[in-house]
Structures are given as C-alpha cells and as structure tokens.
Image (cartoon, rainbow, N blue to C red):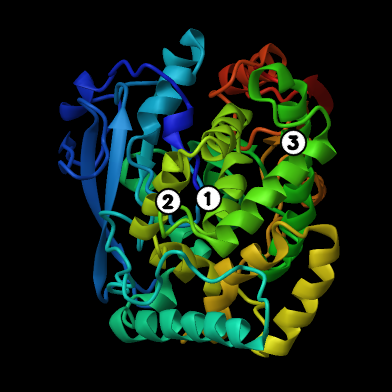
C-alpha cells in the first residue's frame, strides 16, 4: 500500500535554480547533456533534463540498452550533488528535485545541485506497459473484505488476469525491473555526472533503494538521508502485515482528531462515535453506491489515502459531512481518480520481483484473516493491492542483503506513527546499517522531511548535510 509522496499536499512555492544546468561547468564535467524536459514528464518550469543509456541486463552490459530520464536543478559547479527518490516503488521522480531544492535550508541549497530520475520501468525511463485494465476493474468495485467465496474468487481472478496481462505485454522488461538494478542505474548516473561520491535523499521505498545502493556501492555513497524507512528484514509480502495495524492506529488517530473538532463537523465527540458514523457511511454505500460508482471499496480507499498526512484529515471530515447532506462529490472524485489508476504496472513489477511471495492463495487467505482482527479497515484492502504477486509470471529476482557490507554513516528520520512504513522498520534498518543514526519524530506524517516545519529535525539534518557530522540518536517533537 506504500505510495509515492503526493506533491499536491506539500504546498511549496517552487523557485527555479536550473539556469546553469544547460551549460556544464568545467569544475564538474558530465557526460549528460541537459536541456528541456519532455512536456508530459511532470517537470516544473525550467527544470533541466537529460537522458542516459544503461544496460537492461547488467549481466550483459553490452547488450540491450534502455533509456533513463534524469532531472536537475541547481548549478553543475555546486560542491555537492544530491540524488532524490520519492518512493513508490514505481513513482516518477521528475519534479521532486525542485520540491526538495526549495525545501532545503538556504545554506544547504547554496552547496547542492539536486537531481532526480524516473527509475527504470517508470514514466519516461522505458516504462512497463501492461495495457488497458479499464474493462477488468469497474467501479463500484467488489468489497475488499469478501462477503462470500464467490466475491473472493472474483478478486483472485482479477489478480490473475492482471499478472497474466503484464506477463504477456511486458515480458521483455519484467525480469529486470528490480531494486538492485535501479541501484546499479543510480551508480551509472553518478558516473555520468562525473562524481566519485553522490549524496542521496530517499523517501519511503526510496529508503530501501538508498540502503541497497549504499550496500552495493559503499565507496561511492556520500551523505545519505532516509525518511520513512522500509523494514529491511522482512519480505515485501510481510511488510503489508506490518502496515495493517499501523494504518488502523492512524485511522483511530484521525477519528479522534475529528471528534476533537466536533463543533465544526458534528460527527461525534469521541473517536468511537466518529468511527460509528464512518462505518455507517461504508454500510450505506455498500447497499447503494454514491453516484452509482462510489461503493465501500472506494470509501475505504479514501480513508487509506488520507492517512499519509494529517493535512488530508479535514478533507475526510468534510467529505463525510457533505455526503450526509446529500453531496457525494468528494466520494465521486476519489472514485474517478482510482478509475484512471486502476493498476500501477511499475509498482507491481518492482514488488512482485521480490522474494517471499506465497504462490498458494490459501496462505494469503489465512494470513489476512488473522490480520483482519487487528486491522479490520485495512487487512483485506492491503492484500488485494499485492495479490497479482501471487501469480506473477517472472521472478523472484536475487536481492542484495541490506547492510551486508560496511556502509558510510547514514541518517534515518522516522515518524513514530507512520502507517505505510511503521517504526519497527526504521529500528531494524538502524540495526543493520552499522554507524547509522535514527531520529524519531513524534508524529505520523509519512515522508515529511523538508515538507513540514520541524526545527528539531531540520537543524540536525542541515548540520549533517553541511558537515557530514551525524547527530546522536534521539527523539523530536512532531512537525507542523
């Protein structure tokens, strides 16, 4: 259920710093030719872009090549280069370089050029194309929690069809869409930029990618910050079962927040009362979908999507109030968005190539039934997101064991109540990356470094980026 950082919730005003990128400085030789970005890439104004050829299969470096799109902001004569990944997996990085650059403190920005890229299989970097799924996945969709064996069989059949269609249409790419290969691509980017070491900022899945890079290429790893940290010790399949109770806890925090705003929303004065209202809404749309297309699964997606950042909580409350007053527009809006994002082929390609996915559906059912006791709003939802991996036509691929080599000092920043990447993952990453430091922020906003104000976190990270000196392990108050 891990998603990319959503730029719409960041609220930054972007100031372009890319003017010098079209004319590489002598002090920073590069093989990349920066110019205009593709119009449909998502690049913000005046961001510079370049392309780079890399091997599809690194075991055959002179074989078929694929093309990566790289974006940049800042000066090529900057003292430091920072590469950024926003998460996903399968999320485009184009546009994130600007958001990060603007968010960096002025002293840091003066020393850094910021780069991002579409990872292989994503966006403009030889994307995985599984074709059209609009006829397969309709809205309102089936309930996430099956009411009977027939509904479960229908969901399983959908998952099989997604896997089969991806295997048929993208069979040449799928075996090579892996985190290890994305890390190898990062090193090719470093080489093309003419740098012996490159600094890195990774969010969510980007923490796994960064930690993998540091393990594979420790001698070329500079200052690295990982925010909202993925658990390095469990499979991607098991990660979902860590997420379930963390999402449920975030939902309870949301209900409690709405209860605290009862004068504004009148949805109940306790978290229990607000949850009862929410569950009544779910029951109502299950019987009669709003607008004929927003049913129980669609409102479950609305709840799940809102838990990445507190900034979305008022929108959920307003959607409930509006629906109770006869206006389903907010529910229909999320439904229409889901209709355009029925399947994320790149995310599936990265996830499903990982080891550890059971091929026996009975294992999934048994594990999800257990998870449902602790996370009744999310267990089945999370299971169906990953279900095509039970039938994936390729893999599993070999995967680097994070921390299996000595890595340079790395800074981990983790929200205590993060739903998509629970705290246990950050603690385990801290344990396997010897010499790393862990700052725990007493909040729940996912991947919020640079995008929310937190003087405690920001000051410690700034010092690290400027000097390379890591802070001590510690705790910080929640940001704003």
Q: Taking 345 as reference, is 436 left or right?
A: right
Q: Residues within 10 Å of mark 3 (few under 14, many from 20)?
A: many
Q: Earlier in the sequence, mark 3 or mark 1?
A: 1
Q: Which residue is mark 1?
A: 3
Task: Residue 250: give x, y in percent of width and height.
Answer: 74, 41
Residue situated in front as seen by the camera: 255 or 470:
255
Q: Is the residue under label 2 in contact with that under label 3 (CB below 8 Å)?
A: no
Task: Residue 32: give x, y in percent of width and height.
Answer: 22, 42
Secondary structure of the residue carrying numbered label 1: loop
Q: Which residue is mark 2?
A: 91
Q: Which residue is mark 3?
A: 255
| Residue at the (31%, 26%) spot, across then down | 73
Q: Earlier in the sequence, mark 3 or mark 2?
A: 2
Q: Mark 3, mark 2: which one is toward the viewer? A: 3
Secondary structure of the residue carrying numbered label 3: helix
Mark 3 vs mark 2, CA separation in Å: 29 Å
Q: Is the residue under label 2 in contact with that under label 1 (CB below 8 Å)?
A: yes
Q: Taking 198 as reference, is 148 left or right?
A: right
Task: Residue 396: give x, y in percent of width and height.
Answer: 56, 81
Mark 3 vs mark 1, CA separation in Å: 22 Å
Q: Is the residue under label 1 in contact with that under label 3 (CB below 8 Å)?
A: no
Secondary structure of the residue carrying numbered label 2: loop
Residue 313, quarter of the rendered image: top right
Above or below 205: residue 37: above
Residue 170, quarter of the rendered image: bottom left
Quarter of the image for the C terminus: give it: top right
Q: Earlier in the sequence, mark 1 or mark 2?
A: 1
Residue 341, quarter of the rendered image: bottom left
Query: Is residue 478 in view?
Result: no
Query: Is residue 63 in view?
Result: yes
| Residue at the (50%, 40%) spot, across then down | 5
Above or below 453: residue 448: below
């Amino acid at each position: 259920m891990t998603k990319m950082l959503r730029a719409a919730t960041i609220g930054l005003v972007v100031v372009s710093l890319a003017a010098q990128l079209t004319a590489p400085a002598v002090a920073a030789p590069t093989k990349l030719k920066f110019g205009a970005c593709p119009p449909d890439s998502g690049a913000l104004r005046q961001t510079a872009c370049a392309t780079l050829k890399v091997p599809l299969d690194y075991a055959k470096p002179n074989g078929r090549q694929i093309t990566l799109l790289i974006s940049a902001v800042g000066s090529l004569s900057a003292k430091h280069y920072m590469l950024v990944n926003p998460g996903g997996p399968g999320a485009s990085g184009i546009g994130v370089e600007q958001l990060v650059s603007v968010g960096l403190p002025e002293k840091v920005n003066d020393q850094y050029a910021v780069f991002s890229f579409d990872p292989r299989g994503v966006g403009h970097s030889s994307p995985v194309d599984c074709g059209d799924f609009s006829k397969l996945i309709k809205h309102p969709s089936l309930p996430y929690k099956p009411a009977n064996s027939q509904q479960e069989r229908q969901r399983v059949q959908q998952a099989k069809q997604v896997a089969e269609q991806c295997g048929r249409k993208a069979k040449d790419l799928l075996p090579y869409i892996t985190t290890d290969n994305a890390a190898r691509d990062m090193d090719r980017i470093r080489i093309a930029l003419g740098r012996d070491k490159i600094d890195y900022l990774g969010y969510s899945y980007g923490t796994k990618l960064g930690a993998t890079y540091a393990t594979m290429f420790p001698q070329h790893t500079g200052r690295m910050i990982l925010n909202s940290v993925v658990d390095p010790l469990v499979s991607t399949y098991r990660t979902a079962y860590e997420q379930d109770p963390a999402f449920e806890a975030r939902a309870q925090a949301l209900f409690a927040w709405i209860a605290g705003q009862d004068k504004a929303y009148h949805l109940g004065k306790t978290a229990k009362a607000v949850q009862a209202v929410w569950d009544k809404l779910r029951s109502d749309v299950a019987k009669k979908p709003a607008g004929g297309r927003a049913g129980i699964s669609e409102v479950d997606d609305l709840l799940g999507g809102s838990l990445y950042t507190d900034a979305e909580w008022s929108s959920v409350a307003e959607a409930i109030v509006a629906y109770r007053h006869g206006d389903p527009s907010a529910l229909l809006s999320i439904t229409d968005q889901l209709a355009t994002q029925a399947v994320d082929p790149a995310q599936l390609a990265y996830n499903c190539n990982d080891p550890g996915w059971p091929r026996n559906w009975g294992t999934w059912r048994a594990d999800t039934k257990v998870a449902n006791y602790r996370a009744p709003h999310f267990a089945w939802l999370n299971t169906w997101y990953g279900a095509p991996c039970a039938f994936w036509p390729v893999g599993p691929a070999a995967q680097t064991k994070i921390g299996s080599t000595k890595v340079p000092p790395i800074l981990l920043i983790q929200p205590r109540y993060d739903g998509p990447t629970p705290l246990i993952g950050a603690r385990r990453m801290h344990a396997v990356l010897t010499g790393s430091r862990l700052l725990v922020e007493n909040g729940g906003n996912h991947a919020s470094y640079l995008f929310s104000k937190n003087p405690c976190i920001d000051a410690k990270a700034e010092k690290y980026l400027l000097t390379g000196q890591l802070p001590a392990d510690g705790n910080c108050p929640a940001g704003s």
